[in-house]
Image: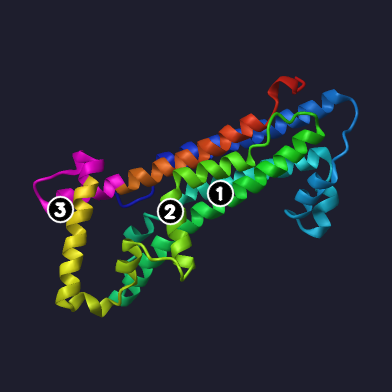
Amino acid sequence: MEDKPSESLTDELAAQITSVASTLEAAFVRHLKKLGSTPTLKRSTLDAIAKRVPRNSIAQCSTPEGAASLLALEIEYIGLRISRYQFIERYREHFTAPNCEMGAAFIAHIHTMRGSEIYIIMERSTAFLDFLAHYTNDLGLLSARRARALEKTFKTVYERHLRERHRIVHAHEKSSLASRVLDAPVGSREIPAYGESILQIGAALTQSLLDVAPHMAADDAETFMHNVNEHRLKVVDDECRTMWSTLVGHITETVNHAKLLK
């Protein structure tokens, strides 16, 4: 069983995040120097800046160069959250609960955290793309507004996680099978009827996993669980990469690169 975060993925994303942030900032700064005159940032851009910095830093960030630096910092912040998303499914491998009650609570919280983190990343990415669109529009570099497109992509690709988050938060929503299992009191596992239900759920889950990834099949239970865990972590890593590539794609589509002065 893999018992540590994917260092290669961490390094891979860190390098890309730094590159995207610094390249975009450098491109804007170079464009501003070539313009010869300083463009005026409109109210929508200034409002976006004011939402992101302390009051005593607003003046410093309200210049075109300051706003470019703030955009780069925002990319780094969102990128870091995306990179750390992979750890959520790895926390349990580094935590030994002192009792069953705490162990059950920990797993339930991890289940909730995954959907919540995707929602945070979606919201911050959408707000960032709005900010980027306002800024590029002020510089005459806006190609397209991509915030709503990113939100639509997230809600499609991560529909299951986001739907689960909604179910957990809102009492009127019927809980998912996973939530009902995780929310059951620890003592209920000793009730025969509940135990039988768990076995049925386990059999159904095993079959669904084999349908998705036949390579997990194994002759012994230990090897099967090892394969399941590796598949689980691979899915999380793929989600990290997809979130990041989605954000970068929409950043690229927002800026009209043909108009950037070089």
Residue occupying the point 50% across, 47% down = 155
Magenta segment: 210-231
Residue under numbered circle 1 = 122
User: Mark 3, residues whose alpha carbon is within 10 Å: few (<14), some, or many (≥20)?
Assistant: few
Q: Earlier in the sequence, mark 2 or mark 3?
A: 2
- Residue closest to the eye, 158 or 226: 158
Does dot 1 land on a helix, a strand or a loop? helix
Where residue 65 sits: x, y (%)? 80, 38
How far apart marks 2 and 3 lie (CA) works out to: 28 Å
Residue under numbered circle 2 = 161
**As drawn, is 190 to the left or to the right of 4?**
left
Q: Report the amino acid beneath label 3.
A: Glu
Residue under numbered circle 3 = 222
Residue 61 lies, with reference to residue 25, above or below; the image says: below
Query: Is residue 21 highlighted in magenta?
Result: no
The secondary structure that most of the magenta stretch takes on is helix
